Amino acid sequence: MKFKGNLTDEANRLSSWVGKDCCTWKGVGCSDKTGHVVKLDLHYPIFDDHDPNFQMNQLRGQISPSLLDLNHLNYLDLSMNSFYGPLPSSLGRLSYLRVLYTGDNQLNGSIPISLGQLSKLEYLDLSNNSFVGTVFELHFAKLKSLNELYLHSNSLVLNVTSQWIPPFQLQVIQLSSITVGPQFPQWLETQKNVTHLYMSNASISDVIPDWFESIYCGTIYLDLSNNQIKGKVPISQKCKYRYGNGAGDKELLLSSNRFEGPLTLPSDFYFLDLFNNLLSGPITVSDDNATMRFMYLVLSNNHLTGVIPVSLCKAKDITLIDFSNNQLLGKIPPCLG
C-alpha cells in the first residue's frame, strides 16, 4: 500500500488494492507454497500513444523504496507507464529477481551500481527512459544468468575495458541510441549465443574485426545502421547455422555507415539494407545456383557499377528493391521491371 500511495492512478487501475490479502490484488502474484509476493506486473497493457486516454490510463509517480520490502520478488514489470525519478539505489537487494521491465517510462538519473548484484536476473529492460551517465563493468558484475539486455534510447555511455569478459552469455543485445563507440565493442567476441544484435546510432566509427564473423553467422537480426563503421561489409559466405536452416531468415540493417568495396550478396537473408554507404564495383551473388529468398533489398546511395545480376530473379517473394543513386548500367532484368 505504501507503493500505491506514491502513485497517481486516474484510471483506477489499482482499485482492487484494498484489504489485507494482497495476493488477490490485480497485478500481484504470490507463491502457492509460501504466500510471499513474487510477481508485480503493472505494465500498461496496450501501448497506443494515439489513444486519447493513453496518458490518463498510465500510472504516474516515483518508484517508492517500499518496493524493496518485497524481497522475494522474482518478476517486476512497470513498463509503459509514466514513472519518473531514479531507480531505488538499493535495487540489488531484490536478490530473487529474474525479470525487470522498466522500459517506456520517464525514469531518470544514473543506473544504480547495485543492479550488478542481481545474480538471478535473466531479463533486463531499462529502455526508452531518460537515464544518464556511464554504465560500467560493475553494473554487470554478478549478472551471470542474464540472457536479454535492453538499454536502448537513453543518454547512457557504455564504458568497459577491451579486456572485459562479461559473466553472462546474451541472446538478445539492444544497445541502440546509447554511446557504445567509438571502438567496436571487443567484449562481443565472448558472446556465443547472440541471435539479435541492435547497435544502431551507437557512435561507432571503427572497423569491424574479423572475429565478428561468428556473431554474424549466429544472428537472425543484425542492426548496425546509423554509425560511421568503416571497411568491408560484415557479410560472411561461410556460415554454419545454429538456428533453423539458416536460409532466408536473416535481417541485416547496415545503412548510413562507411562500408566500402564490392558487394557479394548472400543467399541467407530476406531483408538487407545498405543504403547510404560507400560501396563500389559490381554487384555479385555468392552462389548463382542458390535459391534466393529475399523480400527487401536496398542498395541506394552508393557507388555501385556494372549491371544488375539476372540471378536476382530467383527470388520469388520480392517486395522492394532499390538501387537508386548508383552508377549501374544496362537494362533492368524483366523480372524486376
Image: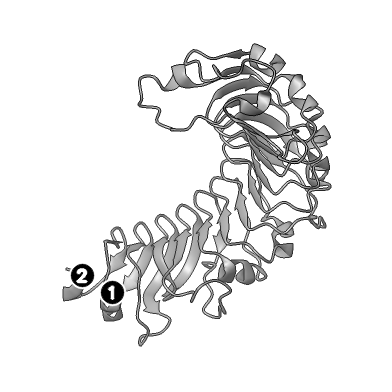
Instruction: Please say if the residues under marks 2 and 1 sit with CB atoms less than 8 Å apart.
Output: yes
Sort mark 2 into few (<14), some (14-19) or many (20+) by Cα contacts within 10 Å.
few
Rendering quarter of residue 286: bottom left
> Looking at the image, can residue 301 be seen?
yes
Q: Where's the N terminus, which quadrant?
A: top right
Check the image and report above or below for 104 versus 311.
Answer: above
Residue that lies at the very extreme toward the bottom in this rendered image: 289
- Mark 2 highlights which residue? 336
- Mark 1 highlights which residue? 308
Q: Looking at the image, which is closer to me, 15 or 155?
A: 15
Check the image and report above or below for 28 versus 2.
Answer: below
Measured as percent of width and height from the top left, residue 259 is found at 50, 62
Measured as percent of width and height from the top left, residue 212 is found at 64, 67
> Looking at the image, can residue 205 be seen?
no
Left/right placement of residue 135 relative to residue 243 reads: right
- Residue type at mark 1 is Ile
Measured as percent of width and height from the top left, residue 301 is found at 36, 56
- Residue type at mark 2 is Leu
Rendering quarter of residue 324: bottom left
Left/right placement of residue 205 relative to residue 67 reads: left
Q: Where's the C terminus, which quadrant?
A: bottom left
Q: How many marks?
A: 2
The scheme the figure's colours follow is: one colour
Sort mark 1 into few (<14), some (14-19) or many (20+) by Cα contacts within 10 Å.
some
The structure residue drawn at horizontal position 44% and vertical position 75%, both measured from the top left corner, is 247
Q: Quick one: label 2 or label 1, which is nearer the N terminus?
A: 1
Secondary element under disc 1, as helix, strand or loop, is loop
Check the image and report above or below for 200 versus 320.
Answer: above
